[in-house]
Image (cartoon, grey):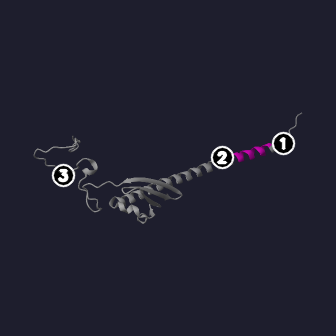
């Protein structure tokens, strides 16, 4: 007759239970680590995108100052570090000759930093008065077209249209 030894079977159940608990613990730890990493990655991406937008805001601010007075490029105190949109930007203007400059802006948000650069060429101004409070009168300087909105054109006599551009009137050619 065959007799079983209960002592060996009891030990194997204990080992199997321990292995199962260890496996479940490792899987739970891996899932927690993965989800934590995804949250951190999302925060870093958000901060970088905000830092880039903040750096671009710095470029826009510097450009708006320089378009009215290009000589401001030679004085760094005209472009101090500025707090903006939950972060900060710092613009550096590098003068390249008398009519060129390079704007470099560093935006920071959280732990992220983004850099943006733009090259400017200061061209001779045509017939438009560029003072900040004056309206633009000759928009064809920018578009090679004359633009009329909210009114009517009265055409009489034997005039001609030049430059061969397309004429749009009420959305019709």
Instruction: Please tell me whether mark 3 or mark 2 is closer to you in this view.
Output: 3
Q: Residue furthest left?
A: 157
What residue did someone put label 3 on? 151
- Please provide percent x and percent y for residue 42: 53, 51
Neighbourhood count class around disc 3 (C-alpha, 10 Å): few under 14, some 14–19, many 20 upward: few
Instruction: Please tell me whether mark 1 or mark 3 is closer to you in this view.
Output: 3
Q: Gap between marks 1 and 2, in whole Å? A: 29 Å
Q: Which residues are magenta?
A: 12-24
Residue 79 lies in the magenta stretch: no
Depth order, front residue of 130/24: 130
- Please provide percent x and percent y for residue 125: 28, 55
Depth order, front residue of 125/43: 125
61 up-or-down from 155: above or below: below
Report if the CB atoms under discs 3 and 2 are less than 8 Å apart. no
Residue 19 lies in the magenta stretch: yes
Neighbourhood count class around disc 1 (C-alpha, 10 Å): few under 14, some 14–19, many 20 upward: few
Q: Gap between marks 1 and 3, in whole Å? A: 100 Å
167 up-or-down from 90: above or below: above
What residue did someone put label 2 on? 27
Along the polypeptide, which appears first: circle 3 or circle 2? 2
Depth order, front residue of 24/3: 24
Q: Seen in the image, is 143 located left or right of residue 43?
A: left
Along the polypeptide, which appears first: circle 1 or circle 3? 1
Q: Seen in the image, is 153 located left or right of residue 37?
A: left
Q: Seen in the image, is 97 located left or right of residue 47?
A: left
Name the residue at 32% across, 54% down.
123
């Amino acid at each position: 007759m065959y007799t079983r030894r209960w002592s060996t079977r009891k030990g194997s159940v204990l080992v199997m239970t321990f292995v199962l608990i260890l496996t479940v613990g490792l899987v739970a730890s891996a899932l927690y680590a993965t989800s934590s990493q995804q949250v951190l990655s999302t925060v870093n991406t958000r901060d970088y995108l905000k830092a880039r937008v903040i750096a671009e805001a710095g470029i826009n601010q510097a450009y708006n100052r320089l378009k009215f007075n290009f000589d401001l490029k030679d004085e760094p105190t005209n472009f101090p570090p500025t707090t903006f949109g939950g972060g900060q930007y710092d613009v550096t203007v590098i003068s390249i000759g008398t009519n060129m400059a390079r704007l470099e802006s560093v935006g920071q948000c959280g732990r992220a930093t983004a850099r943006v650069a733009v090259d400017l060429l200061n061209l001779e101004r045509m017939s438009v008065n560029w003072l900040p409070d004056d309206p633009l009168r000759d928009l064809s300087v920018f578009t090679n077209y004359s633009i009329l909105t909210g009114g009517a054109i009265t055409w009489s006599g034997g005039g001609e249209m030049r430059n061969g551009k397309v004429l749009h009137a009420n959305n019709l050619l």
